[in-house]
Amino acid sequence: GGMRYRAVNICDFPLEIEFEGGQPGPSALINPTGSLWEPLDECVLPRFATAVRVRIPGGSLSEPLLLGRDGAAVLVPDGGSAAEIVTPDTSHRLLLLAPLLRVHNETSLPIRTRFHDSAQHEVLMLHVPQTAACDGALLGFEASELEETTGGTFEGSVSGRGPTHPARNDDAAGLLALPPNGFGAVPGAAFAGRRRGAGGAGNLCAWLSVQLMDAATDSSEPLEIAATRGPQVASCGQQWNLVVEPRICPKAAIATTIVLRAPLVILNALPVGELIVGFAPNTVPATEEWQEAVVQPLSRLSLYSFAGLVEEVGLRIRIKLGMTGLWSDAVCFEGSSFAVTPHAAASNQTVQLRKDEDGAAAGAVLEVCGRREVRISSPCWFVDRSGLSTPLCLEVLCGGKSLPSAAGVTLLPANGLEESCELLLRSACSRFTARSLPAPTSWSTLSWSTPC
């Protein structure tokens, strides 16, 4: 019933660990594991160990690493690697053994990376074993937070599902293959030294290029990666762009994780109909053609065709419900709206949505809710829980016109808690009974008098 312990080693060499703080015992040799973690319970629990030291076999031991301190890390002497304690969940802790530079694929696409020399940027023909990457879920990165939900599509993909080739490393070509939520090691042989003017083990740098696992996509230009390097755009073709940037850490870290992300993500919190999103950088003239994408209800979609860093170029966006809906007014978000700063105020704008030319306008809020993420929601809903069965149904009108609705959920006007609406009961004999209501706040009880 106590805390369990595991070890994952994504270095390309074994590491030896010794346990401290309890009864003396033998050391353990952790070979490269990939996702096939090694249990440490027999070494930790019976001996009441509280810390470990790590070394390359035959080398010097590291400083003690406390097993009970989440986020603790130490350097492995002469190894270009570090040992860290992570707590993926409340049932166990994990000892992560990894190089000082790592890559995490936060997209929903399988990606391959190549490493380059710092001078000519030629591809390094390195040996990259299968154990150089592991599932990010082992480290507490939940795939459900990164991948599009059911019904979402990979915008820009001809098939609508994106590349589906299996993610496997190619030793001969020096490739590091990362499936969605894959966490991989930058080989020590790819380190290009330290960035000029930067100090500390976390400021090692390397050069890499990325490519989607699809023969139809190109490999990006080589990019320098380091803790002190800002976000960059890796272009893998006209419709495929990725953002490459170091993960922001709240405190100084020993190691650096480079994350691969989508340039823009749309979170559709509307429960009705398909949402069509028109988008473009704010720097593009308004007269030029919009890019468009379809986002299913209550889902998220990564827009890989967005060009540039949205925090630099800004975003121009408009939306409509389905093919027959009317486009909302275009709204603009400045690049500064997407900047991640302490106590940053939320940036949001309200637009009107109509299901067709004869429909009433419902309110929708477009909100910047995270770095490169825009959430689209409705401030007021009407949910039909009357239990009426077909052919009886309830319908909400505004000014005698229908509001957008689906499956018993109706989107209300932006000021739906103040604006008067009408509640309509449709009967089998096509006769109607309507009741005028001042606001949804008074909809708690209804008294109907209907001839049907």
Image: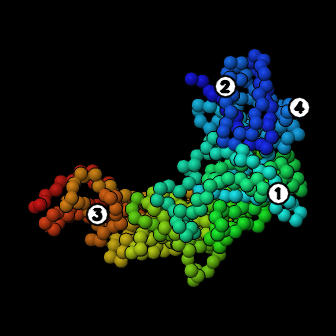
The alpha-carbon separation of the residues under discs 4 and 1 comes to: 28 Å
Q: Earlier in the sequence, mark 4 or mark 2?
A: 2
Q: Earlier in the sequence, mark 3 or mark 1?
A: 1
The alpha-carbon separation of the residues under discs 2 and 3 comes to: 61 Å
Mark 4 or 3: in front is 4
Mark 4: which secondary structure?
A: loop
Q: Position of residue 298 (x, y in %)?
A: 45, 57
Circle 3 is placed at which residue position?
396
Circle 4 is placed at which residue position?
58
Looking at the image, residue 314 sits to the left or right of residue 80; the answer is left
Q: Residue at the spot x=80%, y=31% of the render? A: 16
- The image quadrant of residue 12 is top right
For the N terminus, the quadrant is: top right
Circle 1 is placed at which residue position?
125
Looking at the image, residue 237 sits to the left or right of residue 381; the answer is right
| Amino acid carrying mark 2 in the image | Asp
Circle 2 is placed at which residue position?
41
Mark 3: which secondary structure?
A: strand
Q: Earlier in the sequence, mark 4 or mark 1?
A: 4
| Amino acid carrying mark 4 in the image | Gly
The alpha-carbon separation of the residues under discs 4 and 2 comes to: 24 Å
Mark 4 or 1: in front is 1
Q: Residue at the spot x=53%, y=72% of the render? A: 292
Mark 1 or 2: in front is 1
Q: Position of residue 303 (x, y in %)?
A: 58, 65
The alpha-carbon separation of the residues under discs 1 and 2 comes to: 38 Å
